[in-house]
């Protein structure tokens, strides 16, 4: 059953800080202009929505016969901003791209391009509280809501887009896909994807014990804590974008989200192991998640067909330095887009 509760609150773009440059589009106007997604109707983005697409390079992908549709899909009471790209010829299947915490679809154009180049339709969304989607900034009441959003989204899109469906998730997006696999099989259901790849997947955040202790101490006192930006990539242009130019980058972490991820990790621990095949791509310089623990946990709970280690890569694999990013995309080619 769908709800119309917390997802209806529209989130803000994040607090301004010294040195942040003015954005080339209005977030409020782009969000207000976002229509319901209708794949039966060609509706080019206009005004602030077109400016948003140009700022992140969505418009540059939609060339040479590639079709781009953008709109919101109602999922578990949220309006989920959804990009759908379809190649000129009949697609071989559909690739779903799930971003990480504080990310949004605009940071995943490299992945969209690779999926299209391999003949797949591509769906890239903004999770609740991110990008143009509804929800409180960077927050979620319960991680289970991500699963409900995922199921509602696929129920709405699967009739329109070709199978098989495959998926790749970065960080929190990877954690959502891992949860989908484990919880689906625990309930006696098949996962909705033929192949799944996890990039720097979330199970535990880096410095997990300190995170849990800090949450216990502060949850009754404060609503949020300042976000500390880490150098999550060796690509200086990407770092400049998310530190200074991306208007969707929030400056605070809601304590409710931290509580949600702590409860979610405990729930993952209780789910039974399975033999569902996954592939994992992990950077050796990742300081955002507790990647050694996370990879070990995933290997113990699923069947990791391939693990691709990239020693020089940091956390944001979708936007690493070009030579490192190409290794990531080649892993997507070999083990997902086959």
Image (cartoon, grey):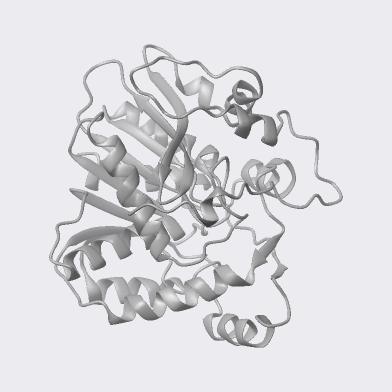
Give the vertical position of 109 relative to 307 (above or below): above
Relative to 317, is 152 on the left or the right?
Answer: left
Q: Position of residue 117 (x, y in %)?
A: 33, 27
The residue nearer to you, when weighing 29 against 162, is 29
Q: Position of residue 160 (x, y in %)?
A: 25, 28
Q: Position of residue 9 (x, y in %)?
A: 60, 50
Q: Where the N terminus falls, by quadrant?
A: bottom left
- Residue furthest to the right in view is 18
The residue nearer to you, when weighing 69 against 11, is 11
Q: Position of residue 274 (x, y in %)?
A: 16, 71
Relative to 251, is 129 on the left or the right?
Answer: left
Give the vertical position of 283 relative to 161 (above or below): below
- Residue furthest to the top in view is 64
Q: Where the C terminus falls, by quadrant?
A: top left
The residue nearer to you, when weighing 59 against 84, is 84
Residue drawn at 48 percent across, 72 percent down: 261
Residue 330 seen in the figure: no
Count of marks overlaid on the render = 0
Give the vertical position of 11 relative to 187 (above or below): above
Relative to 32, is 170 on the left or the right?
Answer: left
Residue 281, by quadrant, is bottom left
Residue 255 seen in the figure: yes
Residue drawn at 61 percent across, 55 percent down: 136
Residue drawn at 44 percent across, 71 percent down: 291
Residue drawn at 35 percent across, 58 percent down: 147
């Amino acid at each position: 059953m769908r709800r119309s509760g917390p997802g209806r609150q529209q989130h803000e773009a994040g607090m301004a800080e010294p040195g942040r440059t003015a954005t080339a589009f209005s977030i409020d106007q782009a969000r207000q202009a976002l229509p319901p997604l209708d794949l039966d109707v060609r509706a080019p983005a206009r005004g602030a929505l077109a400016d948003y697409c140009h700022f992140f390079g969505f418009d540059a992908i939609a060339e040479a016969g590639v079709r781009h549709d953008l709109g919101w899909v109602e999922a578990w009471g949220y309006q989920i901003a959804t990009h759908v790209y379809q190649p000129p010829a009949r697609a071989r299947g559909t690739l779903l791209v799930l971003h990480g915490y504080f990310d949004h679809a605009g940071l995943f154009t490299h992945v969209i391009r690779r999926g299209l180049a391999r003949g797949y339709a591509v769906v890239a969304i903004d999770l609740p509280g991110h990008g143009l989607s509804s929800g409180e900034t960077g927050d979620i009441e319960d991680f289970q809501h991500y699963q409900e959003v995922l199921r509602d989204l696929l129920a709405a899109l699967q009739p329109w887009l070709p199978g098989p469906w495959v998926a790749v998730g970065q960080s929190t997006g990877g954690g959502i896909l891992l949860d989908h696999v484990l919880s689906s099989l625990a309930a006696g259901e098949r996962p909705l994807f033929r192949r799944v790849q996890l990039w720097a997947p979330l199970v535990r955040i880096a410095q997990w014990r300190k995170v849990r202790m800090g949450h216990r101490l502060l949850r009754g006192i404060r609503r949020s804590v300042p976000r500390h930006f880490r150098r999550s990539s060796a690509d200086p242009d990407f770092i400049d974008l998310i530190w200074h130019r991306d208007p969707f980058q929030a400056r605070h972490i809601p304590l409710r989200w931290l509580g949600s991820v702590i409860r979610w990790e405990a729930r993952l621990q209780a789910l039974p192991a399975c033999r569902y095949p996954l592939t994992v791509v992990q950077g050796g310089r990742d300081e955002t998640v507790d990647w050694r623990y996370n990879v070990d946990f995933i290997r113990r709970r699923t069947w990791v067909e391939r693990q691709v280690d990239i020693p020089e890569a940091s956390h944001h694999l979708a936007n690493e330095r070009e030579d490192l990013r190409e290794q990531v995309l080649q892993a997507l080619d070999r083990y997902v887009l086959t």
